[in-house]
Amino acid sequence: MAGFNYIPHTDADVRAMLERIGVRQVEDLYADVPKEFIKKEPYDLPDAMSEGEVREWFESLSGMNAKMKVFVGAGAYDHYTPAVIPYITSRSEFLTAYTPYQCEISQGTLRYIFEFQSMVCELTGMDISNASLYDGPTAAAEAMKMSVACTKKKTRVLLSKGLLPNVIAVVETYARFHGVEIGYVPVMNGQTCPNCLKAELAKGDVAGVIVPEINRYGIIEDHSGFAETIHGAKALLVEYCDPSALAVVKTPAEWGADIAVGDGQSLGIPLCYGGPYVGFMAVKKDYMRKMPGRIVGQTSDKEGRRAYVLTLQAREQHIKREKATSNICSNESLMALWVTVYLSLMGPEGLREVNRLSYDGAHYLHDQLMATGRFTEVFPGKPFLKEFVLQPKEAAGLLQDRLEKAGFFAALETEEGYVSFCVTEKRTRAEIDELVKIVKEG
Amino acid sequence: MKYYDKLIFELSQKGRVGYSLPVNRFPSAPELPEELRRGTSPELPEVSEVDVVRHYTNLSQMNFGVDTGFYPLGSCTMKYNPKINEEVAALPGFNGLHPLMPAGLVKGALKVYQEMDKALSAITGMAAFTFAPCAGAHGELTGLMIMRQYHMNRGDLKRTKVIVPDSAHGTNPASAAVCGLEVVEVKSLENGRINVEALQALLDDTVAGIMMTNPNTLGLFETQIKEIAERVHAVGGLLYYDGANMNPLMGVVRPGDMGFDIMHLNLHKTFSTPHGGGGPGSGPVGVAAHLVDCLPKIQVSGFHGNFGVILRAYAYILMLGKQNLKKVGQYSVLSANYIKECLKDAYKLPIEGVCKHEFVFDGLVNDGGHDDVHGATTLDVAKRLLDFGFHAPTIYFPLLFHQALMIEPTETESKETIDAFIDVMHKIAAEAAEDPAILQNAPHNAPISRPDETQAARNPILKYKDAR
């Protein structure tokens, strides 16, 4: 039998082990499996490749993808990744570690999760963060379930139509199977409509309301009065936020939120065709024991040294089984490390600068596009950060094709037929000028 | 491993920076309205780049990983994580793809999904896979949604129960509850297998399906799987396969051939992608041909699942190819049986016979307890192992035994490593018999000793500011 680099067993090892077990051949170890289930025909798989062949194959696959200048956001933002991050996250002590159940040899993981939780609380202004969730949309779904669990016997959750389409879709999926009815609050004049919210709450039975701090049109929403209205109906306010933007825009805590959720991808995680990203959730203290997911806490060891452990585990599936606050069993630990290293490098000043660059660049693009005369405003004068929508005077598809041929992924079409643009600090003035020129040439 | 006591916040000095950003060449846009701006600055650390690198390097040195040593961790399949996987997943041609790019711009990425769909279907005997779930538990939930959707599509609305064996992973009943299903537990027999008669008594037209692992969490093959499948199908229920224990079946047995209708795989277990200290994982869900229609109606994550993890698993499958697939299953089983036979003199083996990729001991044969001396527990054995450079096995699971120690070596450990582990386990058993306190005070040379978990839960300090 030819050797294989991931399996160390030599023929002599196999013989010695079989002898110790007391069977003649490896097949005998499957003697309890009914014969009809032992697969006899060869598997329909490709031939094994050498490592060099694998590298070449992946290079050819990656070459089949287009290299584009990204001017689209919609839940995945092309922010800069400092060189330090992949260097740290690829350290095998972090990368190849298991979940930190054996805390004595997992203090590295536990400490960075504690730092992650602290940073999420700083950004959101909330009291308590968990160790992370899968992504932003599933974090919103967990918040939907949690609202229902916190407000006994209520079965409706309201979603703003201003939430990203994929957030709405995932929450709807979870709700459908969890027995929660979803109601909707429309967007009027570019913002989740406060009067419609009141009308929906008046129908009763609402456990929670999920609204976007920055909506699918890129507009920073004004949530003045939302918390009072929603708490008046004994429901929870859930703010869905972009954590990068939280360096400059009002925090969920400042809006009076009970739960803050979102996706940490905007904190320097590469686009990577949609994942892995990292969801987060932070809550008011009152809801600590209803929160899903892992939580790390500080304590001390027998010698009195500072130590970190997974704590409040009585909420979790491995203890509570079907009565747990969630079925979630892992987090996105390595991506939480990614975000923690990013925030350490950026600090408050760097994160503000990222926003300033994105904000100025986006407004420059917006004004230049309007100056072409090929668009009309959809929400004139509404405040936006790095993303905005316009109504094109030509078919969106034609515009996209022209941009695509020049290497731009831009002008994503919304369901209303608007086109959206997003600018991060990675986009240069030269790129923007070129994009505008192509728009004009059509 | 050495103790290092800093938090990044404690290195902060006002005015220090760790970032490098381009000069702002845009005209200054008017400020945001005051009422939309945050009131106070977030107190993030202000540190230099070298501070960050040293801090996290020091933290990493308090961590144990697969590259550090052996993880005999039952039900977790902590196999070696090949390095070529990391290299190909970091290629800029994949990393820079926006998830909403149209098909024409992402042909390479779509090819990865198509090839993975084909490969996983070939390995498992399923018809098609969805790659949206981000972890095993997420896959379970998705699979159960598909199960319910199937019944709903047929107008069969009374199927609200799901049967789960008492030996199941905790995520099984939790996923069922999140999916709005009522959990009904079926007891195991003395020999660790599902009690088919007890199962029969639970079967009627309100059963949506059954969730099973095979081999089960005791590492035992459910020999009556054919009969179980026939009986569940006879009342219109479906069979769900929890892929956490797929490793021993690789290249030998396919869940689809045993009658399973829906399953998930843990790419971070069976397909060699790193656990990352608790994620990111990937839990693709496969379905049999009659359930393929149910897949598109269910969106469980933001975009296309954890693409970066799927790339790594694909590289692993290409390295395995049809030639090496069977070695994975066979040698994981060989190594587990070898350890079991070598250690059953010192640790109680509750169920004799051949196991698959893992097995469970029920504590020490001689725990050193007598009159006024407490014996060493499974927890103590686990903690003592850390002193010898091994990770602990899975402990106190499954719940069928009080002192469960669940051991899974995987196929990537050499006989020398396994023999060293066996020697240490014998040494620990001898220590327990002589002086259990050695175990009870372990670990002795980890970065910290056992922490006070009660204090952590009673007086929660969950962020830096709570501690100050």
Image: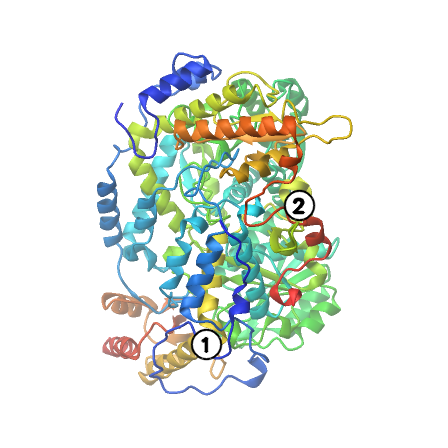
Chain letter of disc 1 in the image = B
Q: Where is residue A149 in the image (x, y as percent from the top left)?
A: 70, 53
Position of residue A13 relative to residue B407, above or below, is: above
- Report the quarter where the N terminus of chain A lies: top left
Left or right of B97? Residue B306 is right
Picture quadrant where residue B324 is located: top left
Mark 1, secondary structure of its residue: loop
Left or right of residue B387: residue A63: left
Looking at the rendered structure, the kind of residue marked 1 is: Arg
Residues indicated by labels 1 and 2 sit on the same polypeptide chain: no
- Which residue lies at the image location 32% right of the left edge and 21% below the top edge? A11
Q: Does any portion of residue A143 appear in the rendered image? A: yes
For label 2, the crowd category at 10 Å Cα-Cα, with few meaning under 14, some 14 to 19 and many 20 or more, is many
Do the residues under discs 1 and 2 have CB atoms within 8 angstroms? Answer: no
B66 or A249: which is nearer to us? B66
**Residue B16: assigned label:** 1
Dot 2 amino acid type: Ala
- Chain ID of residue with mark 2: A
x%, y% of residue B27? 37, 87
Q: Mark 2 points at which residue?
A: A324
Measuring from the top left, give residue A352's x and y in whole percent.
Answer: 47, 77
Q: Is residue A369 left or right of residue A132?
A: left
Camera-nearest residue between A390 and A27: A27
The answer to whether A181 is drawn above or below residue B436 in the figure is: below
Q: Furthest-front residue in view?
A: B434
- From the viewer's side, name the closer residue of A280 and A314: A314
- The part of the image, by quadrant, that contains residue A27 is top left
- Could you tell me which quadrant the C terminus of chain A lies in? bottom left
Q: Can residue B160 be seen in this view?
A: no
